[in-house]
Image (tube, helix red, strand yellow):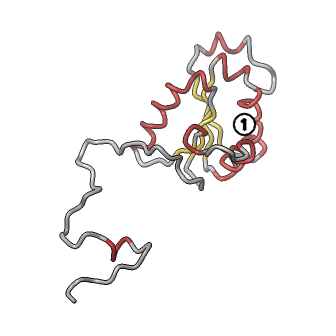
Amino acid sequence: MGSKPSIPGNKKLDADNSGSKKNELKPGTKSPRPNTPEPLGKKDLMISYSHQDKEMMARLRDNLEANGITVWVDVIGLQAGVDFLSKIGQAIIDAKLFITLLSFSSIKSKYCKDEVALAYISQKAIFPVVITPQAELLSEMDTGM
């Protein structure tokens, strides 16, 4: 008689009545990255990168997220079996800003070039982050980049 009713899907009513905060993180700790992809949706920015540069992308993403910026990257944004090209395209359109990591592998990647082109024609603010010395990249970049 003294307990509150449980309503499926209502976290407020389903919460533990003891007042404990089971999911609260201690100051200075990072939230563990879930094993399942993040739900698709509008994010502050999208990072375009070559998968050969995934360690640099992960460091950038983690720093941005630690500062309250929502980030979409294909490593966490896509589930198996989805039409990844349309999901990447939608992520570019939905994002407020677009970051492209520039390296030898990304400037040669058709997918990275296409992502930059879509961001450009979608009038997104594009922020290139050069991870290979710029002087070395310029001679390899085509006119479109």
User: Quadrant where the C terminus lies?
Assistant: top right
Q: Nearer the viewer, residue 135 or 118?
A: 118
Does 6 sit left or right of 52 as displayed?
Answer: left
Q: Position of residue 130 (x, y in %)?
A: 58, 23
Question: Dividing the picture into quarters, in which one does residue 24 lie?
Answer: bottom left
Q: Amino acid at mark 1?
A: Glu
Q: Is 119 situated above or below 10?
A: above
Q: Residue at x 63, y 34 (%)?
A: 48
Does 37 sit left or right of 118 as displayed?
Answer: left
Residue behind mark 1: 115
User: Quadrant where the N terminus lies?
Assistant: bottom left
Q: Residue at x 23, y 83 (%)?
A: 3
Seen as rendered, the residue at the extreme front is 1
Question: Dividing the picture into quarters, in which one does residue 30 lie?
Answer: top left
Q: Residue at x 18, y 70 (%)?
A: 18
Q: Secondary structure at mark 1?
A: helix
Q: Nearer the viewer, residue 87 or 49?
A: 87
**Number of marks drawn:** 1
Q: Is 117 situated above or below 134?
A: below
Does 27 sit left or right of 84 as displayed?
Answer: left
Q: Position of residue 59 (x, y in %)?
A: 45, 30
Q: Position of residue 34 (x, y in %)?
A: 44, 45
Q: Residue at x 59, y 55 (%)?
A: 41
